[in-house]
Image (tube, rainbow, N blue to C red):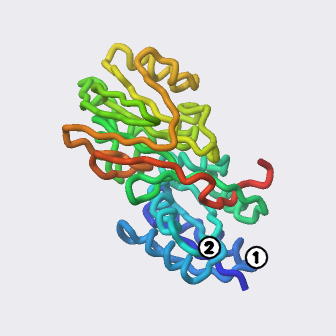
């Protein structure tokens, strides 16, 4: 009998994740899987459960939760001799990775996707010694987004990020950064540096419209000047998928990027607090097998 491990974050989906658990189990069992369920209780649990599933020879791992749970789960797949395919039930605040793969955001529809016969190979990013799946951000704005509480995420959804971000935008706080890529160097002050693997960032599905999940590239944006009076024009550029052409934005693609600063600058990685600078980013092309809808 084939094996499947479900990794579920009980606090995801406004704490409704466990309500969908039995439906996921039933569908997997109908597909011939013997199912093991693991509930996360603290940071790092999903990675540990993912490693154990790989070592046990599981055929599929299903992540029930948000991008943070998915981030941990994928880090458990890294470097494993046996790597199961990955199913995703997106129950987070933003669910960027699922958006990029056109996995339904309605839980019941996402559950039905687990029966799909289509598996897509997608890129993973490496940040120092860990993996990321969607986006790395650095700067004052990224630091403010990290401070969003779980309660606010549950109550306000994506608006919780907007509320915190506006506080920093109004102050126009910046850090000096040095960004190196492909033999080039950028030095300057910026409130935000973004490195994206997919087209969806922060729930904006057109922020990086050129980015594909399997193009082997990091799509990078340096916001050079985000004072209060041009915030609206940046927002319009994001909504229209034209951020890279904004006069206050430098855009480039790369396979390796290093970012450093003389200041203490923390990062936000896949929506969660990341390490302080300096960081080195690279791409692992077509590294993860994800179950996606048959209709794509």
Of circles 1 and 2, the one toward us is 1
- Provide the residue designation for mark 2: 22
Disc 1 to disc 2, C-alpha distance: 12 Å
- Dot 2: element: helix
What crowding class fits label 1: few (fewer than 14 Cα within 10 Å), some (14-19), or many (20 or more)? few
Specify whether residue 14 is in view. Answer: no
Q: Is residue 87 above or below residue 281?
A: below
Q: Is residue 122 above or below residue 143?
A: below
The percent coordinates of residue 243 (x first, y second) are 51, 24
In this rendered view, identify the residue nearer to me: 44 or 35.
Answer: 44
Horizontal side of residue 168 vs 14, given as left or right: left
What crowding class fits label 2: few (fewer than 14 Cα within 10 Å), some (14-19), or many (20 or more)? few
Query: Residue 178 shows which numbered tag?
Result: none
Q: Residue furthest left?
A: 263
The percent coordinates of residue 54 (x first, y second) are 56, 76
The percent coordinates of residue 23 (x first, y second) are 65, 69
The reply to whether the C-beta atoms of the residues labelled 1 and 2 are less than 8 Å apart is no
The percent coordinates of residue 168 (x first, y second) are 28, 30
- Dot 1: element: helix
In this rendered view, identify the residue nearer to me: 64 or 241.
Answer: 241
Query: Residue 30 shows which numbered tag?
Result: 1
Residue shown at 51% from the left, 62% from the top: 74
């Amino acid at each position: 009998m084939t094996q499947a491990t479900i990794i579920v974050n009980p606090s995801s989906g406004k704490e409704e994740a466990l309500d969908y658990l039995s439906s996921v189990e039933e569908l997997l069992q109908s597909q011939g899987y013997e199912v093991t369920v693991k509930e996360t209780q603290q940071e790092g649990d999903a990675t540990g459960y993912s490693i154990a599933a790989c070592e046990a020879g599981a055929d599929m791992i299903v992540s029930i939760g948000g991008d943070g749970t998915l981030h941990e789960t994928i880090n458990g797949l890294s470097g494993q001799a046996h790597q199961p395919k990955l199913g995703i039930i997106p129950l987070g605040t933003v669910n960027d990775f699922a958006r990029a793969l056109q996995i339904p955001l309605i839980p019941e529809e996402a559950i039905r996707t687990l029966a799909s016969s289509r598996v897509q190979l997608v890129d993973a990013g490496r940040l120092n010694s860990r993996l990321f799946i969607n986006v790395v951000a650095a700067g004052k704005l990224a630091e403010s987004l990290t401070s969003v509480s779980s309660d606010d995420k549950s109550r306000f959804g994506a608006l919780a990020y907007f509320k915190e971000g506006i506080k920093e935008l109004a102050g126009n706080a910046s850090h000096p950064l040095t960004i190196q890529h492909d033999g080039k160097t950028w030095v300057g002050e910026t409130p935000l540096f973004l490195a994206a693997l997919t087209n969806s960032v922060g729930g904006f599905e057109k922020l990086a419209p050129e980015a594909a999940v399997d193009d082997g590239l990091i799509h990078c944006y340096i916001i050079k000047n985000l004072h209060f009076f041009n915030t609206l024009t940046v927002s319009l550029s994001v909504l229209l998928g034209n951020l890279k052409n904004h006069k206050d934005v430098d855009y480039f693609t790369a396979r390796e990027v290093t970012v450093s600063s003389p200041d203490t600058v923390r990062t936000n990685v896949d929506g969660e607090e990341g390490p302080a600078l300096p960081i080195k980013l690279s791409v692992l092309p077509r590294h993860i097998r994800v179950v996606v809808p048959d209709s794509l």
